Amino acid sequence: MSLFTKPIETALKERDAAIQEAQDWEQKAAEARATADELEATATAEILKDEKAAERLSLEISTLQRKAKAFDQAAENARVSATHAALSVFIVEADELDKEATKQRKAADKFEAEVTALREKLEELDECNYTRLVEESNWDAVDGKYRTRTYHHGKAHGIKQSAMLLTTQAQVIRYWMKHGQVPGSLRDLNEAFEPIHDVTGAWANGAPIDKYGDPITENLRVALAAAADNEEE
């Protein structure tokens, strides 16, 4: 799951525009340099035919070479801007993920309060307590295996889990920006940021990074793939 909001869309457009600008300058530099090389290759023959062409050809070739050099510098400046714009995409995305996570947690708290109020009314009306089914695992000696009853967390829990996934995605982005790699477990995130992830119990290695779902957003996945391709080259 990846979040797509207006700020993220704007950041992506600015990044793509910067990349396109760099490519345009690179193309202009290549064209100017190719034209200069073509003139250089035929200059001797033309000068032998007409000595007066020497000054003109020299000026044209020199001008094209200066243009190519200027275009190279413009392309380099644009590439720097593109790099900053690409980083801005991740900064904006992480911030937007945090905002959406906060929004979902507030919605979950509100819904949970409404459910609690309704349950209290039901308990008062029916004169007994009501609670969600709790998971129970009991060993069956006859079958030689555990028998587990289904645990129903409720809707609010599902919303909170979604919020935790968003928070995890934001933290993974920031972790990658700082360390150049994705974290290996939720314990890594707890050590790098506010320790909000439960890594106790069965997770000896600190709980899997995908505990709540896919922690890698599409934008980060593309960046990781591009980095892997560059390493192979």
Image (spheres, grey):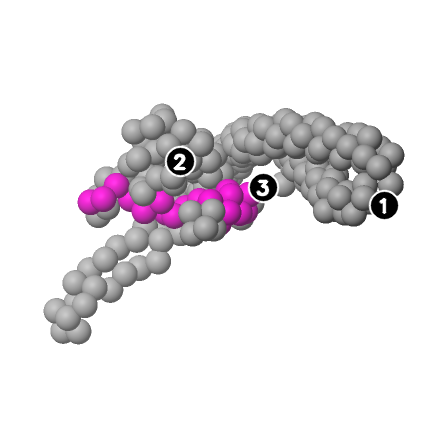
In the picture shown, does residue 233 fall above or below 83?
below
Neighbour tally class for label 1: few under 14, some 14-19, many 20 plus, Cα within 10 Å: few
User: On the image, which quarter does residue 26 sit in?
Assistant: top right
Q: Is residue 231 left or right of residue 85?
A: left
- Residue bearing the label numbered 3: 3
Nearest the camera: 158 or 140?
158
Residue that badge 1 annotates: 49
Q: Is residue 218 magenta?
A: yes
Q: Position of residue 183 (x, y in %)?
A: 35, 39
Residue that extends furthest to the left in the rendered view of this protein? 141
Cα distance between the residues tagged 1 and 3: 67 Å
What residue sits 27% from the left and 61% below the top? 148
Identify the amino acid type marked 1: Lys
Pointer 2 residue? 180
Report which quarter residue 3 is drawn in. Answer: top right
Q: Residue furthest bottom?
A: 143
Q: Earlier in the sequence, mark 2 or mark 1?
A: 1
Residue 226 appears in the rendering: yes
Label whose residue precedes the other's in the sequence (3 or 2)? 3
Residue 11 position within the rendered picture, expressed as x and y whole percent measured from the top left: 65, 32
Which of discs 3 and 2 lies nearer the camera? The answer is 2
Q: Does the stretch in magenta take in 156?
A: no
Taking the image as shown, residue 217 lies to the left or right of residue 182, namely right
Amino acid type assigned to the residue bearing label 2 in the image: Gly
Task: Residue at 67%, 35% (x, y): give it.
Answer: 22
Image location (x, y in percent) of residue 207: 29, 44
Amino acid on which disc 3 is placed: Leu
Q: Secondary structure at mark 3?
A: loop
The residue carrying pointer 3 sits among few (fewer than 14), some (14 to 19) or many (20 or more) residues within 10 Å by Cα, namely some
Q: State the extent of the magenta-drawn residues as a range.
A: 204-228
Q: Label 3 near label 1: C-beta < 8 Å?
A: no
Residue, x 34% and y 28% (percent of image)?
192
